[in-house]
Amino acid sequence: MDLNLDTLKREILSYLEETGFAVFHSSPGTLDSGSSMVLWDTEHHPDYRMFLDVATKTGIKLILFGSREFEASDLDELVEQLDASDVPRDEQREYRSRLRNLRSYEGQTCTLELAFDYNQRLYVYELQPDWYEEFIELDEEIMARATDDEMGDDETLGGYFSKN
């Protein structure tokens, strides 16, 4: 679903303040660093209030909140990778067209994360709009192609071998 996360971000922050949660503004994408995580099913239960209701019922007072804006540099880096790759011209045109379409989202919120710790598990509510998921898929495709090009057809270690 293509959500307007900018509006939702303001709504969530207002709700957190109204309900008395302490908000720790975290960097998005850093929640998975070594913690045991449980992800909220936002596809079937998209209402963030349900997630925060669970936090309330378990006695949680501190909520981690992270958001990220989509930046031109995200696209620029991908274009640089594409330029450096040996992707055929017709495929490059298709990739560039898809990247141009994503430029209209520059400055918009592309990810929202809410989380709380309970019994040494991190419970996480995360939302991303469809267009950002498309960007991530495009990023993975281009990076995979660039990596394949760097390795070439011969995937040996260039004379290095193990005597194991």
Image: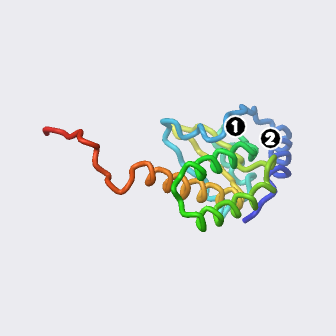
Front residue of 27 and 84: 84
Q: Report the residue marked by disc 2.
A: 16
Q: Provide the secondary structure element on which disc 1 rests.
A: strand
Q: Are marks 1 and 2 in contact (CB under 8 Å)?
A: yes
Residue assigned mark 1 = 63
Residue at left offset 75%, top offset 33%: 23
The residue drawn where x is 63% and y is 49% is: 78
Compared to 116, does 145 lie above or below? below
Residue 112 in percent (x, y) is at 71, 47
- The 10 Å Cα crowd at callout 1, few under 14, some 14 to 19, many 20 or more, is many
Q: Nearer the viewer, residue 97 or 11?
A: 97
32 vs 42, left or right, is left
| Residue 81 x/y as whole percent | 58, 48
Q: Position of residue 161 (x, y in %)?
A: 20, 40
Mark before the other along the chain sequence, 1 or 2? 2
Picture disc at residue 72: none
The three-letter amino acid code for the residue at tag 1 is: Ile
Q: Residue furthest front?
A: 89
| The image quarter in which residue 64 lies | top right
Query: Which image quarter is the C terminus in?
Result: top left
Q: Quadrant of residue 47?
A: bottom right
Q: Residues within 10 Å of mark 2 (few under 14, many from 20)?
A: some
Q: Amino acid at mark 2?
A: Leu
Which quarter shows the N terminus?
bottom right
- Kindly identify the residue that appears in the image at 66 percent across and 48 percent down: 54
Q: Secondary structure at mark 2?
A: helix
Task: Say whether residue 106 is left or right of residue 53.
Answer: right
